[in-house]
Image (cartoon, rainbow, N blue to C red):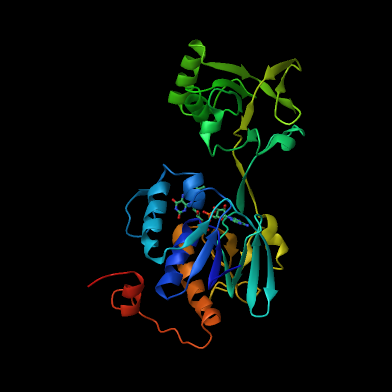
Amino acid sequence: MIKTDALIIGAGPVGIFCVHQLGIIGLKCEVVDNLDKIGGQCIELYPDKPIYDIPALTKCTGEELTNNLIEQIKPFKTNFHLNERVEEIKKDKKNWIIKTNKSKEFEAPNIIIAGGVGSFEPRKFSAQEAEKFEGQQLFYSVKDKKIFKDKTISIFGGGDSALDWAIELSNTSKIILVHRRDDFRGAQTSIDKIHKLKKEGKIEIYTKYQLKSVTGKNNIEKIIIKHENESEKEIKTDYVLGFFGLIMKLGPITEWGLNIDKKHIPVSTENFETNQKGIFAIGDICTYPGKLKLILSGFHEGALAARECFKYARPDEKLRFEFSTTSKATHERLGIKK
Ligand SMILES: Cc1cc2nc3c(=O)[nH]c(=O)nc-3n(C[C@H](O)[C@H](O)[C@H](O)COP(=O)(O)OP(=O)(O)OC[C@H]3O[C@@H](n4cnc5c(N)ncnc54)[C@H](O)[C@@H]3O)c2cc1C
């Protein structure tokens, strides 16, 4: 059981900045995110796109913003629990007990939901047998590319992820690229490279095909792909990779006894608390009259939620309002030496 002052659900920009706001008033927190990296939509959906409305930054990309936010919270040495989804929460006396899908447990007087549009999850194959091999020889992301060396890999999808991995893994493996349409959607340079690799005999390409079935006893032995004209093809393969993009699911958040209004959590604008004491919602997931789904609004929401968290985490203390320019306590927490 990990005990902390606040558990933040979601490592998007708003969740990360809230770590800072808790940290400078002396509160500890832990952060859980379903994704394998920090940054939420900024890193998953638009890492290279410039953002123009972050105060005092004329222009920065989703990735630059994320890196700056991570740098800013370094002094607090916060633990991020990635690839984990918060599944269950329950009240135990004054504290909340929070459980993830990997059975990790946290105890905290405060939960801050910064879950954006919900947890990002990969769109999966509909072929039923695919589930049996998921996580063994069938994957929706690549964690360790070494396992694919000298093997045959069937890659499904027509976007950047499918093309980039087909190109990269073709250096060490036999690649079969399958896409349900004729045209690929990725960057033109990647499409050109794929066609070049095909000409060189390094990649086989099948378009207008989809996965029909996966077979094998313990490991995948072969797959059958089906053309839009109903003809079928059998392919011997060791691994299957699917890159069909991500879907966003509110998922378990809807089962925690919170008021939900059109997939959003209504909050009080005084402190961003939900209808449950000690549970806050900030960023894209919260709603209130006049809500703007902007990063800057989420920063403000996190600042107020953090101060309310102080009341539950330190009921016998009073929080004094201080500026970061002049607060000695803040400077100490940030490790600033004068
Ligand atoms: C293409 C595009 C361009 C944009 N441009 C701008 C712009 O110029 N300016 C601007 O201000 N905003 C912009 N936005 C909007 C901005 O990205 C969002 O407002 C912002 O990302 C919201 O931050 P967040 O931290 O609330 O949520 P998110 O960034 O969505 O992060 C939420 C995180 O919570 C995780 N999560 C959810 N549920 C769970 C769970 N149960 N367990 C574990 N983890 C969970 C998710 O995996 C995700 O990583 C843009 C958005 C897009 C898509």
Can the viewer see residue 197?
A: yes
Residue 252 x, y percent position in the rendering: 69, 58
Quadrant of the image containing the N terminus: bottom right
The residue drawn where x is 50% and y is 68% is 29
All told, the count of numbered labels is 0
Residue 63 x, y percent position in the rendering: 41, 47
Q: Which is more toward the observer, 229 or 5?
A: 5
Residue 174 x, y percent position in the rendering: 56, 19
Q: Which is more toward the observer, 46 or 139?
A: 139
The residue drawn where x is 72% and y is 17% is 234
The residue drawn where x is 34% and y is 69% is 334
On screen, residue 34 above or below 170 = below
On screen, residue 272 above or below 9 = below
Q: Which is more toward the observer, 174 or 313?
A: 174
Residue 41 x, y percent position in the rendering: 51, 49
Q: Outermost residue toward the left?
A: 338
Quadrant of the image containing the C terminus: bottom left
Q: Quadrant of residue 69?
A: bottom left
On screen, residue 129 above or below 72 = above
Q: Quadrant of residue 147?
A: top right
On screen, residue 257 above or below 206 = below
- Horizontally, residue 278 falls left or right of residue 221, namely left
The residue drawn where x is 54% and y is 70% is 6
Can the viewer see residue 259?
A: no
Q: Which is more toward the observer, 68 or 150?
A: 150
